[in-house]
Image (tube, rainbow, N blue to C red):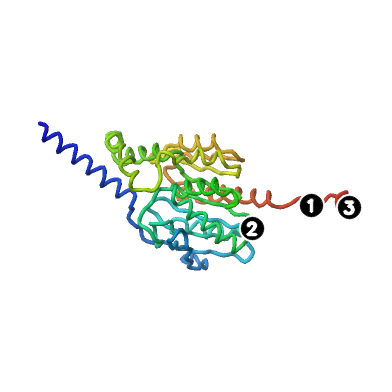
Amino acid sequence: MLIGLSLAVAVYLLILIIVAWAATHPPRSPIFLSPSAMGIAVEEIELPCEGLTLRGWWVDHPNPKATAVLLHGYVMNRAENAALAARLHEEGVACLLLDFRAHGKSDGNLTGIGWPERADVLCACEFVAKRHPQTPRVLIGSSMGAAAAAFAIAEDPTCADGIVLDSSYSSLPSATLGWWRFIGGRPASALLAPVILVAWPMVPFNPFSVNVGRALARSDKPVLIIHGDEDDLVNVEHAVRNHRLAGGKKHLEIVAGSSHSETRWLDPERYAELLIAFIDDLVSDRIEPPLSAHDSSLS
């Protein structure tokens, strides 16, 4: 009996280790779409960042009203944002589509599902600031990319003028429970709950301190939060909490009938309208009001 119990415990621990390793060393999905497929010119770019080389596409605009850094989700790559970049280009927005570390064509093999990736976002912000230093900048992230955007702007408020969080988690530990529940229901969620503890030594940070809500509370930047009410991967309660804690001007858009990061596919025009209105507000906020007659008489 004791031998059997010990063997069962050993097998269970081995499963947890395998799952933790697989989660932090994700498979790379292929590049399946680009803005060039929709007639939009792209520039292949490489960014040095923390000893890694990050790769992506720069979609420039001759006279941009804003620049956007488009940030993909976990196990995805820059192609996730190809259609969005083409749509934003039509509206006069220059875009950087980035492959996060350990994703797409970028270097690295270890992901932290948002926290280490904040450095990738900051490197991307430096790139777009050099290309168009006078234009407002916005971070538009999906899932993991949204979390990374929140952490980046909390660390460096000069990174961008506003952020869009599409299907972001609020706290990483609670999000992992949702992922396991999505994969195998409540039994899987209970059995795999300790994976985050096993993964802790594999990543260079404390996963229990990774909290998007707290990051938003430290920022006064405008934020647009988009979340589906049928998100089985990251429950809509995450979005409600992020919205409640956000410290700046904020708007929460809960989309009926949409699951995780689905709004962009189910209703792309509505999704684009939300983003464009948000960007236009940022542009308006950056425009200084004209001098009054009294002010002008003083010059």
- Amino acid carrying label 2: it is Thr
Secondary-structure class at tag 2: loop
State the separation of the CA atoms marked 3 and 2.
29 Å
In the picture of the structure, the residue carrying the numbered disc 3 is: 298
Identify the residue at the far right of this view.
297
Q: Secondary structure at mark 1?
A: loop
Quadrant of the snapshot with the C terminus: bottom right
Lower sequence index among marks 1 and 2: 2
Work out whether residue 90 can be spotted.
no
Residue 290's tag is: 1
| Tag shown at residue 6 | none
Q: Position of residue 154 (x, y in %)?
A: 54, 45
Closer to us: 77 or 154: 154
Question: In the image, is residue 109 above or below residue 162?
Answer: below
Q: Nearer the viewer, residue 215 or 170?
A: 215
Q: Quadrant of the N terminus?
A: top left
Q: Which numbered mark, 1 or 3, is in the foreground of this view?
A: 3
Badge 3 vs badge 2, beta-carbon distance below 8 Å: no
Q: Amino acid at mark 1?
A: Pro
Q: Where is 34 relative to 276, above or below?
A: below
Q: Residues within 10 Å of mark 1 (few under 14, many from 20)?
A: few
Q: Amino acid at mark 3?
A: Leu
* Of the image marks 1 and 3, the number of the one nearer the N terminus: 1
Asked if marks 1 and 3 touch (Cβ < 8 Å), the reply is no
Quadrant of the rendered structure where residue 108 is? bottom left
Residue at x 59%, y 63% (from the top left corner): 130
Residue drawn at (62%, 62%), measured in percent from left and top? 132
Q: Specify the label residue 135 is tagged with.
A: 2
* Residue 42 percent coordinates (x, y): 51, 67
Q: Which structural element holds mark 3?
A: loop
Quadrant assignment, res 207: top left
266 horizontally vs 61: left or right: left
